[in-house]
Amino acid sequence: MTNIESTKDQPQPNKVISVTLKTLMSFFGIAILSLGTTFLREGQVGLDPFTALNTGMANKFGLSLGTYQLAANVVIFVFIVLLDRKKIGIGTVLNMVLVGYEIQWFSAIYKSILPSTVNLFTILADAIIGLLLFTLGASLYMTADLGVAPYDAIAPIASDRLHIQYRIVRIVQDVLFMLAALLAGGPVGIATIIVAFFTGPLITYWNTHVSQHAVTSIDRFSTQPSFKGVGTEIVELGRVSYGAVSHAYKMTVHTQQRLSGYSNAELAGRLNVTKKNLDNAKQIYDNMSAQYEMLKNEAKRRHDNNDETK
């Protein structure tokens, strides 16, 4: 029996259950991203370039953030439909409709619960919590692979059509939107710069330690759904998430404490080291994934052979 036949014989995930659970994962990811943005906004440390621009423009036109951001997303969405509709999914619609309004809702809750006093402690707390939640939410909704936000689809489409590296296109995109946000009077601050430089590594960290585990759990449960399986996967995901959040918090605090003390040369060095570590981690992950698939197929082949001999 060949590996191809063995793979075909393996139980396949129930598509309805899988898509439903991944939609919920995307929904919660977007909610967490919006909550993180709220902490950055209320801490007055700046927002990501796109939200900063939308906030400034919404103030100029006398509109709510949710309404203006939805309108901006619809405009970008039309171009995505024309250029590359493969980027569109239920996650795209959830992101473009919900984020702006969720930020408004979470901001109202924030103001009603937490003190309005702004000092060094609240600024640092809002920046750290906001950055962690923002990147975790982005990781969850993107790893669900049900479509990306209209803003996030611009760079990969431009990269493919202009034959320029995605990283370069994304940096140019973020810088242009940040400059536009400045001109519009949007809340650009230190967090805007941190988001531009450090969201990539943090999102990669969340992908490896939380989001990919969540997708694996969904696929496993979708293959053999049961109430017992739900409990097992939730406990395991909770354990992994707690460890990841704890470690990411320590990493973020350490980076923020040292960020202002880096010289230009030290900052360039840290960026190079971080990039190499990310590349190495990706290679290790790809190799381990390939080994896992080969071992799984071999185990299935032996199991099938044993069944045939009985």
Image (cartoon, rainbow, N blue to C red):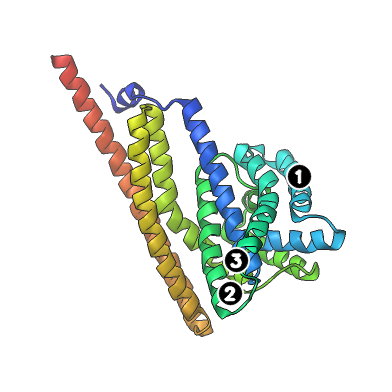
Please identify, in this view, whether the residue under mark 1 or under mark 2 is nearer the observer: 2
- Which tag, 3 or 2, sits closer to the chain's start? 3
* Residue on which the image places disc 3: 114
- State the CA–CA distance, disc 1 to disc 2: 33 Å
Q: Residues within 10 Å of mark 2 (few under 14, many from 20)?
A: some
128 lies left or right of 292: right
Q: Residue 183 placed where, x, y %? A: 80, 70
- Which tag, 1 or 3, sits closer to the chain's start? 1
Location of residue 252 with respect to 24 vertically, above or below:
below
Q: Residue 205 placed where, x, y %? A: 43, 58
Closest to the observer, 37 or 195: 37
| Visible residue check, residue 154 | no
Give, as a three-letter code, the residue at label 3: Leu
The local secondary structure at tag 3 comes to loop
* Residue on which the image places disc 2: 123
Please identify, in this view, whether the residue under mark 3 or under mark 2 is nearer the observer: 3
Give, as a three-letter code, the residue at label 1: Val
Closest to the observer, 65 or 266: 65
| Visible residue check, residue 256 | yes
Q: Residue at x 47, y 82 (%)?
A: 266
Mark 1 and mark 3 residues within 8 Å of each other at the beta carbon:
no
* Residue on which the image places disc 1: 74
Q: Residue 92 placed where, x, y %? A: 64, 42
The local secondary structure at tag 2 comes to helix
Q: Which corner quadrant holds the N terminus?
A: top left
215 lies left or right of 5: right
Closest to the observer, 291 or 248: 248
- State the CA–CA distance, disc 1 to disc 3: 33 Å
- Which tag, 1 or 2, sits closer to the chain's start? 1
